[in-house]
Amino acid sequence: MRSILHGDVPNIGGRPRKQDIAAEAFTEIYPSGKGRDSWPTVARRIEEKLGERISIDTIKRSLGQK
């Protein structure tokens, strides 16, 4: 599988959409869903993985929950 996070997909026309990156990171960190983790905890873990700031709303939008 090609991965946006690992640079396997060429960057054509600008940076990748943050929602796509958030969704991929979420799936890698939480393959079975977030369980009991709060949204702030989810955001912190995704930020640590990506090395950049990402809002809870962006994460929720990426998962179709907002």
Image: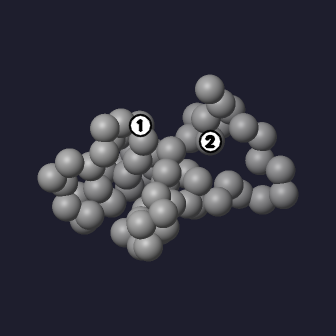
> Where the C terminus falls, by quadrant?
bottom left
Q: Is residue 33 above or below residue 7?
A: below
Q: Are marks 1 and 2 in contact (CB under 8 Å)?
A: no
Q: Is residue 48 above or below residue 14?
A: above
Instruction: Give the CA separation, mark 1 to mark 2.
Output: 12 Å
**Which x, y percent locates residue 46?**
37, 52
Upstream in sequence: badge 1 or badge 2 = 2
15 relative to 12 in the view: left or right: left
Report if residue 44 is visible in the image.
no
Residue kind at label 1, given as amino acid type: Glu
Which labelled disc corresponds to residue 28? 1
**Which x, y percent locates residue 20?**
58, 54
Q: Circle 2: is it few (<14), some (14-19), or many (20+) Cα within 10 Å? A: some
Q: Is residue 29 above or below residue 19?
A: above
> Where the N terminus falls, by quadrant?
top right
SS at badge 1: helix
Residue name at image x 57 percent, y 60 percent: 18
SS at badge 2: loop
The quarter of the picture where residue 38 lies is: bottom left
Q: Circle 1: is it few (<14), some (14-19), or many (20+) Cα within 10 Å? A: few
Residue name at image x 64 percent, y 60 percent: 17
**Which x, y percent locates residue 61?**
49, 67
Residue kind at label 2, given as amino acid type: Ile
Which residue in the structure is indicated by mark 2? Answer: 4
Residue nearest the observer in this picture, 12 or 60: 60
The colour scheme used to paint the residues is one colour
Residue furthest right in the image: 13
Residue name at image x 65 percent, y 36 percent: 7
Report if residue 8 is visible in the image.
yes
30 relative to 57 in the view: left or right: left
Which labelled disc corresponds to residue 1? none
Residue name at image x 42 percent, y 41 percent: 27
